[in-house]
Image: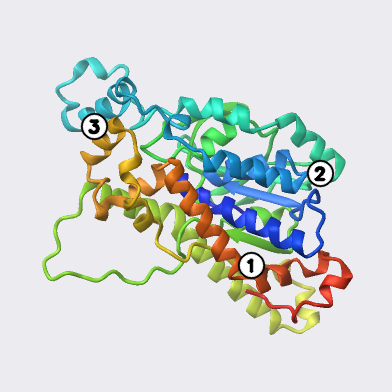
Amino acid sequence: MLTGGGARAAYQVGVLQAIAALLREAGWRSQHNPFDIICGTSAGAINATALACRADDFGASVQALVNVWEHFEVEQVYRADSLGIIRTGARWLSLLSFGWMLRQWHANPPNALLDNTPLISLLHRMLDLPRLDAALSGGSLHALAVTASSYTAGQHLTFYQSAADIEPWSRTQRIALRAQIGVDHLLASASIPFIFPATPLNCFGHREYFGDGSMRQLAPISPAIHLGADKVLVIGSGRLTEPARAIVEFATYPSLAQIAGHAMSSIFLDSLAVDIERLNRINLTLSMLPDAMKNKTPLRPIETLIIAPSERLDAIASRHVGSLPRPIRTLLGGIGATETRGAALASYLLFQSSYTRELIGLGLRDTFSQRENVLAFFAPELPVAVQACQSDFVSH
């Protein structure tokens, strides 16, 4: 399960690269896909779909992701030229400030801070969607799921594609819909609110406008479980437990970027931490029940391995803000995102290779530091001779 987080999703690529290396060292065939079910949200949905499209060759799939993320430039995701910024970001900020004066924009207001049309071309280059159908029909993959949030209906939707006939599920404020996943679903899932425009999708016989799948995502791990998973690897895009920041005696009023970064953390990080706590409580409760009572509940224990950044990604982003093109730096500087205290917002938009490579490196280090946990998580699938060398199973 790959979470959202814009440019922070580079961390996921480092984790996957390390997992591929560890499994290869343990005797795993590099072509074999270790994940029957792949779920993703926002930028994680893009990585998830890229993995799923090449599920018949896991090693090559991970390397293809590494090649993209190691050579990123913001121009591959959104327009960063002066004209593009004037047409979107500058107009959008002006409308917020002086919209009551600018009558000519009432009929055709700017939809978002940035124009993400370049992302469409990138997705078509990254993805081989016909190959996804072959992976599902050939047994290399059981299911793919991506999530998005409907501005129109106010609900959170999981779009899933599977070889087996899996019944859609429905819960409070979140529903599932079987679909042929395409580029539009990924654009919708990765449409960070206010930053990128909403994406229209046809569902249930009508058109709805969708934004980032991390919004209103009350149970991020739930789609994997509904699709049949009994063990889940979760790769986060931020530290799940942040130590409290030092409080200065006279704090200054937060900048717009600082407030936006705080809101982004709420959207992308908080629900995952809560869902993990909930899952651990359910597992603990089930472990205390006698078998007779376990058989009467639809709940089942879910084994999890959580890998999340060991460092603050906004602190890393603050060191790379200067690599952004000047028009973007000017735009973000106007709301305080180029300052250290506003770097959390920049951390989601820094699709620059200097930043993404550092996150990939962090993902590698964090995963190698959990070597025993990773190998234990995959132990039942590893060759018998390799299993005998592993320590007792550890659930993290």
Q: Residue beneath label 1, please?
A: 305
Mark 2 or mark 3: name the one nearer the start of the chain. Answer: 3
Residues packed near mark 3 inside 10 Å, few (<14), some (14 to 19) or many (20 plus):
some
Does residue 1 appear to the left or right of 270 in the view shown? right
What kind of residue is marked 1? Leu
Label placed on residue 93: 3
Which amino acid does the dot numbered 3 rest on?
A: Leu
Q: Nearer the viewer, residue 59 or 204?
A: 59
Q: CA distance from mark 2 to mark 3?
A: 47 Å
Give the vertical position of 2 relative to 375 (above or below).
Answer: above
**Contact check, label 2 and label 1, Cβ < 8 Å:** no
Would residue 65 be found to the left or right of residue 343 on screen? right
Residue 305 in percent (x, y) is at 63, 67
Mark nearer the N terminus (1 vs 3): 3
- Disc nearest the viewer among 2 and 3: 3
Check disc 2 and report the residue beneath it.
165
* Occupied quadrant, residue 162: top right
What's the residue type where badge 2 is placed? Asp
Please state, as top left, top right, bottom left or bottom right, where the C terminus lies in the image. bottom right
The secondary structure type at the circle numbered 3 is helix
Using the rendered image of the protein, determine whether residue 242 is visible from the camera's viewpoint: yes
Q: CA distance from mark 2 to mark 1?
A: 28 Å
Instruction: Compute the Cα span from label 1 to label 3.
Output: 42 Å
Q: Earlier in the sequence, mark 2 or mark 1?
A: 2
Tell me the SS state at disc 2.
Answer: loop
